[in-house]
Amino acid sequence: MNSNISLKAAASLLNLRVNQTSFFLINGRRFISTSRILYQKDKIKERVPFPGATESYFTDKMQFIHNVEPIPTYRVMDRHGRVIDSSQDPQVTESFAVKIYKDMVTLNILDLILYDAQRQGRISFYMTNYGEEAYVGSAAGLDSEDMIFGQYREAGVLLYRGFTLDEIMNQCYSNEKDLGKGRQMPVHYGSKKLNFQTISSPLATQIPQASGAAYALKRSGKKNCVMCYFGEGAASEGDFHAALNIAATMRCPVVFFCRNNGFAISTPSLEQYKGDGIASRGIGYGIDTIRVDGNDVWAIYNVTKEARKLAVEEHRPVLIESLTYRIGHHSTSDDSSAYRPSKEVEEWKRLDNPLVRLRKWLENHNWWNENLELEFRTSIRKEILNAFSKAEKLNKPSITELFNDVYDRPTPNIIAQRQKLKRLIEKYPNNYPLKNFKNEGKDL
Amino acid sequence: MTVREALNVALEEEFIRDERVFLIGEEVAQYNGAYKVSKGLLDKFGSKRVIDTPITEAGFAGLAVGAALSGLRPICEFMTFNFSMQAIDHVVNSAAKILYMSGGTIPCPIVFRGPNGAAAGVAAQHSQDYSAWYGAIPGLKVVSPWDSEDAKGLLKAAIRDPNPVVVLENELQYGLSFPVSQEVLSKDFVLPIGKAKIVREGKDVTIISHSRSVNFCLEAAEKLHSEEGISSEVINLRSIRPLDVDAIVNSVKKTNHLVTVEAGFPQFGVGSEICAIAMETEAFDYLDAPVERVTCADIPTPYAENLEKLSSPNTDIISKVVKRTLYKKR
C-alpha cells in the first residue's frame, strides 16, 4: 500500500487543510467527518467553473489519487473490556447494560439450539450470529419507533426490541402461530409491532427500500430514522450504490449499518473489494461515515446513537461500517472449513469475543459475576428449550393461508384455485391428510 | 381528450384526493416528464410530491417500495418499461410478495407506470412489451390502457388499489385523442381492475387485444365488415392480471371463433395465455376453429423502418388471420 497517499501528505502536497467545522462529537470526543473535508478556499487557487464538482480547483500537477489514509476504527473497550478513554464510556445504567448482555447471551444459546435442530432435521435452515453479537449495541442506540430493515443475521435486534422466544420458534417451525403464516424460510422474521420489516431473501433490496422508508418518515415529520443492516458482500450489489446515492440526494434520515464480517459466504472481504472497506464508499457519496470495532458493543452503541442524531435532526444519511468476524458458517447450507482454517476461527473465538468483552466490562463494574452467569445461562436455556418444544408440537398453519394475502382480497383466479383444491381434498381425503393443519382444511 | 391529458388529469385528481400520493422518476418534475405526462404537477404540488431522481432505477424503484411499506402511496415512473429491467427485483421479488411474506401485515400500495411496447424507430432495446413478464407474477396487478377512458379510469384505480399495480401505457397512444363521456370527466371516475370491455360487438369472430393493438383490431373489424360482411367482436382486455376470463369465454360462446392480437413476442405471451384459457374452460366446446394468435415477430425489434413495420401486427395481417380462421379465402 505504499502507493497510497496519506491524507496528511496529500494535504501538505496540495496545500489543503481540513476544515475545523468538519469534526463532529461523540461523547465529547471529536471525530473527523471525512465527507466534509473541505479544500481551502485559497484566493490563489482558481475554482473550476464546471457544475459537476464546484469545490474543485485547477492544478498544474498531474496526480492520480489512489487512496487516502485508511479510515480509522473507533472503539471504546480493548479486548479485555477496559475502557481506553474514559470520556468515551457509554454512561449507561446497570439494568441497561445487563439487558444488552443478556440479549447477547440469549442469542448465543438460541443459535446453539436452533443450529443443532437444523442438523437433526427438525427445521430446514438456520443462520447463526456467532462472533457478531455486539451488533445488539446498535439496537440499543436506536429509538423503538425507528424502522428496521434487516438482511437476515439480525435476530439480536429483534430480541432487544422484545420479540419473544415463542415468536422466534414459531417462525422457525412455520407453525400456526408464525406471524408470517409459514410462508418464509427460517430466520426470515418480521414484526409490524416492533417496526421490523420482514426479511427479504434477495440481497441488498432492503437498502434502497430503507431510503424510501426514511423518506416517508421525513415527510411525516416524525422524529425517527430508518436503520438498515447488510453485509459487506451485499454492498457489492448495485442496490447498495443506488441506495446511498439516492439517500444522499434526497436527504433521507437513514443509517446504513454494514456488518463487515470478513466473508460473503465463502468469499473473503479482500476478494470482495479493493478499496478501503465499505466505509470509503460512503465518503464518495457525500455521506457521513464512520468505521467501528464491531466486537465492541459500546463503540457500536455510541456511534449508532450519534448517527441517529445526524439522521433525525439534520436529515443526513449515515454509513457505519462495523468490522467483525463471522465465527459461524454462513448458514446451515455452508461448511466454512472448506475455505478457512478452523484454527483461525478458534483464535477469533478465543481472543476477541464480543460476549467476553462485555462480560469483563460488566464484571469490572461489579454488575456481573460467575454465579449470575451460570444462573442466567441455565434459566434462559430452559426457557428456550421450552419455547422450542412448544413450537414443535403446534399445528401447521391453515391450508387456506396458501391463498390469502396474495392480494388484499382474493382475485377470481385465486378463488378458483382454492375451490379446486377444496374439491380435490374432499374427493381424495386419504391422499391429503390435513390432521396436522389448523382447521384441518375445513375453512377452505 | 388525449391519452396524455387523461393520464395527467388522473394524476392530478389523485394527488388532490390523497396527500400520500407522490410521483417519482427520472425527469418527472422540472422537465414535466420525458413524455409530458406529469406536466404542471411540480408547479401545483411542489418538490415534496413530484420528485426528480438520479439515473438509478434500482434506487428510485426501491425507494418507492420502501415508501409504500411505510404508509405512502408512490407512483414510480419508468421512462419506459424497458428500463424497469434494472429494477425488476423490486417489482417482482419485493412489491409483489411483501404482503404475502409478511403474513398479510404489510401492504405495498404502489404504482409502477410508464410507456410499454414498441414506439417508433427506437430499435430492439426500447421496443419491448412487458405485459407477459409482469402478467406472470402473483401479487401484481397489471393493466394496459388503450384509450383516454382506459387511461384515466385504470390509472386512478391503480393509485387507489392497496396492491402493487403495473400500468403499461403506450407512447404512441399518448398523443391520440378519444371522445370521452361526461362520466369519464368526473373526478370520481374509476374503472374496475380485472374487467375487459367489448369495444365493438359482433357475432362471427372474437378478436381479443389490448393497448395500441386495439386500434388495428377496430380498423380490421370495420374493413372486414364493409368488405366481407364479417361481424367481429373486439374485446379490449384493459387488465392483463387479473384476466377477465368470463368476458373471453362468453364472447367465444357467442362467436365460436377466437383471434388474439398483441404487440408482444409470441412465446409465453398474452395470446398464449388466452389460448390456454380457451382450452381449459367451456370455451373449448364452442370453438369451431383453432385459436389464432397475431403477435410481434419472434425477433429483437429491428430499427430499419421497413423491417420494423413488418415485425409487428397491423390491420391487414389481422384481417387476413380473421378470414383464415373463418375459412374465408380471398
Image: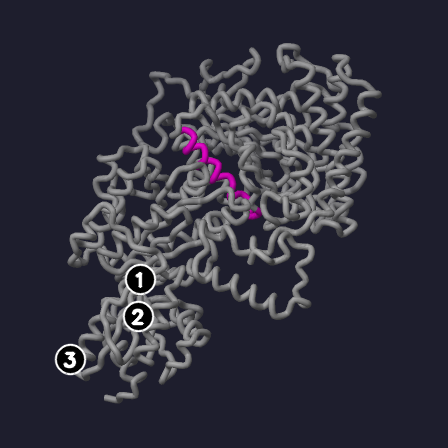
Chain under disc 2: B
Q: Is residue B72 left or right of residue A118?
A: left
Q: Is residue A38 left or right of residue A28?
A: left
Badge 2 amino acid: Ser
Tell me which residue sits at (51%, 34%) in the image.
A281
Tell me which residue sits at (82%, 30%) in the image.
A378
Residue at the spot of label 3: B226
Q: Are marks 1 and 2 in contact (CB under 8 Å)?
A: yes
Q: CA distance from mark 2 to mark 3?
A: 24 Å
Q: Position of residue A438 (x, y in %)?
A: 64, 52
Q: Is residue B107 visible?
A: yes
Badge 1 amino acid: Ala
Circle 2 SS class: loop
Same chain check for tags 3 and 1: yes
Chain under disc 1: B
Looking at the rendering, in which quadrant would you find the N terminus of chain A?
Answer: top right
What is the crowding at mark 1: few (fewer than 14 residues within 10 Å), some, or many (at least 20)? many
Q: Main secondary structure of the magenta part?
A: helix
Residue at the spot of label 1: B118
Q: Earlier in the sequence, mark 2 or mark 3?
A: 3
Badge 3 amino acid: Ser
User: Image height check: is A439 above or below A38?
Assistant: below
Which region of the structure is painted magenta?
Answer: A201-218
What label does residue B312 carry, if any? 2
Q: Is residue B299 visible?
A: no
User: Image height check: is A370 above or below A328?
Assistant: above
What is the crowding at mark 2: few (fewer than 14 residues within 10 Å), some, or many (at least 20)? many
Q: Quadrant of residue B140?
A: bottom left
Q: Is residue B198 left or right of residue A299?
A: left
Q: Position of residue A298 (x, y in %)?
A: 65, 21
Q: Are marks 3 and 1 in contact (CB under 8 Å)?
A: no
Q: CA distance from mark 3 to mark 1?
A: 30 Å
